[in-house]
């Protein structure tokens, strides 16, 4: 376990710093924006799609389990990313309107 | 470290996520922030597809990858474009569940690789696989339940001792995962993986099912941050910095956002998650109470009262959203303003199904931003208000939140509509609101009821006022 930590220390540093950054970055959000912010954050964690693409791209041609599950994962991940960003944009579009 | 364009893509991706999130918390820049994050995501995804190399080998199966991207992209766009504004919250929940499922699937496939192709693996690696699996599937099952509850497919469901069962399942997941991780260097057992997958899904369902609909936004936000952590596990597996930064960023921000939402309702997170079990008992208690009589008001009377008022405050709620009455509501506001009435909207932070829900809806109908009063301001203005028109809001104006300590919503700040001279409540029926509790407000002498679908009632009210 200790060797794993030292092998991944760079990643662990990122984790710790990102936790603080994530808290800092949205610290002063007005309650009006809670929903769009949640939706935007929802789209950002769709970055998991990259893992799905890697899994899919590495899968052996004859490994049907990996192929089918990977394919499903790519679809679901894309849904999360595309749907997430589009929904957020639709919500925020309405905020824009009232500005003029 | 060798230089590669992919590293640069990931760096750009990570930075845009941070900037995007920052801009999303500021009303003026929010939309731009969303687009920036989306652009960064596109760069990171494109970079992965075309530039990713593992042990000198490029990715293959491009047909499958693009097929998946196209299918997911089309369904995602259509679903997101078609969805009604009222159904936004459950859509977000559903998309969140997809991300969680994606993370869980990655863990399953990676585990399968390890079983078929035994290499020396560290305990840390297995731990991350199981973490991704458990968090991802809890998030998936929970989100789907939240989605179903929000659109009314699933009702509240709880049984006695459910929290004990939940804790038991949770411990079982922890113990069996720990066992699998510790014994990982001697044997890897797929059955274990599927067992844990099953338990996690079960836990996700039991975790969300008993929680009341009014608290659903908080739960979705919490599950959102879960999925972020699950995505970060993927970042660990592939030593992929953009997944790690994106995932942890959302995990941390989502957790804070969850706490902020709880604060807006003046409740603790623990209270939302555990309090639901006490709620069912209190609900039956208050339902038994004798409520007395309510009085109805006719459309014509309501029209007269409102057009001769100096100041009218509209309190929108979920009923307005369901009826899609925001445009009619805006028309009513315009007609009354022409008659010299001062019309404002009082927005409770959790009115509707999600914080900010009402703001989005009314903005869609072009209601001016400065007509929307936040709760504190609205409460200051109620004493000088002649008529309060409550449109399909219930729990956010329930005086029980202030007076009845046994009420599940006790302690939640509410709109003090009773301070106004007259209160007109539009509801479809006398049925209790989403939190499932009776509302004393409807039986108070100042209150009169105007039954019917919000849109229909507003249209009729509008023509009455115009005809006067």
Image (tube, coloured by chain):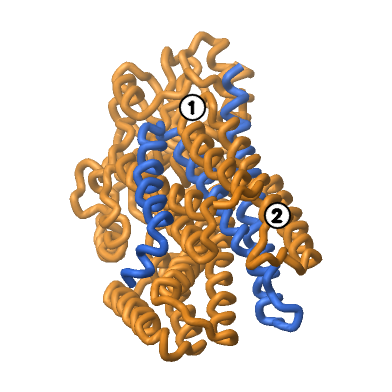
Chain colours: A blue, B orange
Q: Is residue B18 above or below residue B422?
A: below
- Residue A72 on image: x %, y %: 67, 69
Q: Earlier in the sequence, mark 2 or mark 1?
A: 2
Residue underneath mark 1 = B302
- Residue B213 on image: x %, y %: 43, 55
Identify the subunit bearing mark 2: B
Q: Is residue B323 above or below residue A52?
A: above
Identify the subunit bearing mark 1: B
- Residue B252 on image: x %, y %: 39, 49
- Tell me the residue at 81%/65% (across/down): B63
Q: Nearer the viewer, residue B347 or B417?
A: B347
Q: Quadrant of residue B344?
A: top left
Q: Is residue B357 left or right of residue B85?
A: left
Q: Are marks 2 and 1 on the same chain?
A: yes
- Tell me the residue at 36%/19% (across/down): B385
Q: Residue furthest right?
A: B63
Q: Nearer the viewer, mark 2 or mark 1?
A: 2
Q: Is residue A14 left or right of residue B263?
A: right
Q: Is residue B341 above or below residue A83?
A: above
Which label number is shown at residue B51?
Answer: 2
Report whether residue B67 is seen: yes
Q: Nearer the viewer, residue B440 or B106?
A: B106
Do tag 2 and tag 1 residues touch (Cβ < 8 Å)? no
- Tell me the residue at 53%/36% (across/down): B20
């Amino acid at each position: 376990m200790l060797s794993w930590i030292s092998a991944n220390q760079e990643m662990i540093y990122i984790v710790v710093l990102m936790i603080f950054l994530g808290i800092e970055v949205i610290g002063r959000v007005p309650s009006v924006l809670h929903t769009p912010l949640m939706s935007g954050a929802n789209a950002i964690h769709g970055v998991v799609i990259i893992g799905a693409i890697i899994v899919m791209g590495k899968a052996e041609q004859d490994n049907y389990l990996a192929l089918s599950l990977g394919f499903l994962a790519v679809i679901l991940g894309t849904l999360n990313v595309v749907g997430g960003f589009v929904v957020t944009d639709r919500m925020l579009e309405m905020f824009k309107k009232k500005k003029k | 470290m060798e230089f590669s364009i992919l590293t640069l893509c990931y760096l750009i991706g990570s930075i845009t996520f941070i900037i995007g999130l920052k801009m999303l918390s500021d009303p003026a820049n929010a939309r731009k922030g969303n687009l920036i994050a989306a652009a960064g995501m596109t760069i990171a995804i494109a970079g992965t597809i075309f530039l990713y190399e593992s042990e000198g080998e490029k990715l293959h199966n491009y047909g499958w990858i693009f097929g998946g991207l196209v299918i997911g992209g089309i369904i995602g766009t259509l679903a997101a474009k078609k969805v009604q504004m009222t159904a936004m919250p459950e859509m977000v929940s559903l998309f969140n569940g997809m991300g969680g499922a994606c993370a869980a699937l990655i863990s399953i496939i990676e585990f399968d690789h390890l079983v078929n192709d035994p290499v020396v693996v560290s305990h840390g690696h297995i731990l991350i696989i199981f973490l991704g699996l458990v968090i991802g599937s809890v998030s998936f099952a929970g989100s789907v339940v939240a989605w179903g509850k929000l659109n009314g497919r699933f009702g509240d469901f709880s049984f006695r001792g459910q929290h004990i069962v939940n804790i038991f399942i949770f411990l079982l997941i922890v113990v069996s995962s720990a066992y699998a991780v510790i014994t990982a260097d001697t044997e890897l057992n797929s059955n274990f993986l599927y067992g844990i997958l099953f338990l996690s899904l079960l836990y996700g369902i039991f975790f969300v099912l008993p929680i009341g609909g009014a608290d659903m936004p908080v739960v979705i936000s919490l599950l959102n941050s879960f999925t972020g952590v699950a995505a970060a596990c993927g970042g660990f597996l592939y030593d992929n910095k953009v997944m790690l930064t994106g995932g942890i960023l959302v995990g941390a921000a989502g957790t804070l956002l969850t706490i902020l939402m709880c604060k807006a309702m003046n409740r603790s997170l623990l209270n939302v998650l555990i309090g639901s079990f006490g709620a069912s008992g209190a609900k039956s208690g208050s339902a038994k109470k004798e409520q007395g009589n309510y009085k109805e008001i006719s459309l014509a009377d309501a029209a007269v009262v409102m057009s001769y008022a100096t100041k009218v405050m509209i309190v929108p709620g979920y009923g307005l959203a369901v009826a899609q009455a925001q445009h009619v509501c805006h028309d009513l506001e315009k007609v009354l303003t022409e008659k010299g009435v001062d019309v404002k909207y009082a927005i409770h932070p959790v009115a509707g199904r999600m914080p900010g829900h009402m703001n989005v809806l009314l903005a869609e109908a072009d209601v001016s931003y400065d007509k929307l009063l936040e709760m504190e301001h609205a409460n200051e203005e109620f004493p000088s208000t002649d008529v309060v028109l409550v449109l399909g809001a219930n729990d956010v104006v329930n005086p029980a939140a202030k007076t009845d300590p046994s009420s599940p919503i006790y302690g939640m700040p509410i709109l003090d509509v009773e301070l106004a001279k007259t209160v007109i409540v539009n509801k479809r029926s006398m049925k209790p609101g989403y939190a499932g509790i009776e509302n004393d407000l409807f039986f108070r002498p100042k209150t009169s009821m105007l039954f019917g679908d919000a849109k229909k009632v507003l249209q009729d009210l509008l023509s009455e006022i115009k005809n006067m």
